[in-house]
Image (cartoon, helix red, strand yellow):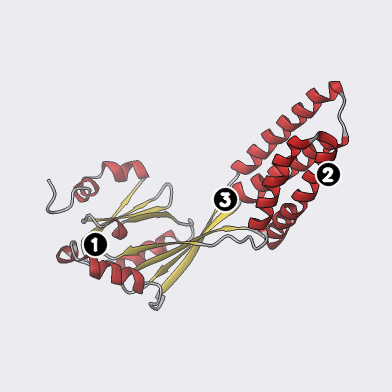
Amino acid sequence: MLTHKDIDNTDKIETMRVALYNEEVLYEYETIEHQYLGYFVALLCSLFIFWMSYDSSHDGLDVGEIIIYVGGGLLLNLVFIFFASADIKRIYKFTKNGILTEQADVLPEYAYQCIRMIGRVGVVVCLVAVVFVGPIAFIGAGASALLSFKLVNFRLKPMLFESLYFDESVIFKTNKENYIDITANTNDTCSSMGFFCNKDNVEEIFNTIKIFYPNGYFFEVMSVKDICDHEKFNEFLHPVGQD
């Protein structure tokens, strides 16, 4: 565990951060955060494309324009629905020296397969559109070709975050949002973090954190706003040694 004597010891801090990936996991839990924005954006996109196609239909729609409207609309909607609305899974792994957090979007395998297939088909669609629309469609064909190469082995890699235990930290739990905030009395940003918990396990997590922070200050408040107004929280925003 880090102390004020280690604030300027960048070598020790970096060594501990790297070691987190190989340390034994003593406690682990995961949360799922649901996202809905992509569905709303997909709806707006569909309405816009419908309006564009309707406006163009006064002069008559040829096969190339239909392909562009339908193909482009389908691609955009799939991207918005699959990726902008994907649930976010976070796995928190408590070790003896810190917390390792893995964050990744929850997507079914067929979503990856669908996107990769669309990337490959995009080139063919745009080349067909060239015949009906003209040379300007080469712009779309070139873009689809580049997209296809990038999507051949498309996978989303989880993001990793490290949080080291600091001897003097203040830990809050909010009863309204089931949120836990850890603010360390140090300039080292790797020792502070905040995360939402499931309602069913927030007490268990809060009690577990007490084990890893034997010298910590623990408080239960009603909401996140109460954390920001708390005297101890504001005290720790200005670590020892700072003006």
Question: Which one is earlier in the sequence, the residue at label 1 or at label 3?
Answer: 3
Residue 155 lies in what quarter of the image? Answer: bottom right
Q: Callout 1 environment at 10 Å: few (<14), some (14 to 19), or many (20+)?
A: many
Pick whichever, 79 or 122, lies toward us: 122
Viewer-nearest of discs 1 and 3 = 3
The residue under the point 22% across, 45% down is 234
Is any atom of residue 67 visible in this view?
yes
Pick whichever, 200 or 143, lies toward us: 143
The residue under the point 75% across, 38% down is 137
Query: Left or right: where does residue 40 sit relative to residue 193?
Result: right
Query: Left or right: where does residue 49 sit relative to residue 98?
Result: right
Query: Left or right: where does residue 49 sit relative to residue 203?
Result: right
Residue at mark 2: 128
Q: Position of residue 19 (x, y in %)?
A: 35, 74
Residue 120 lies in what quarter of the image? Answer: bottom right
Q: Secondary structure at mark 1?
A: loop
- Say which amino acid is labelled 3: His
Question: Which one is earlier in the sequence, the residue at label 2 or at label 3?
Answer: 3
Residue at mark 1: 216
Split into 4 quadrants, where in the image is the C terminus? top left
The residue under the point 75% across, 56% down is 117
Residue at mark 3: 34
How far apart in space, not on screen, are marks 1 and 3 (Cα)? 32 Å
Q: Is residue 167 above or below residue 228?
A: below
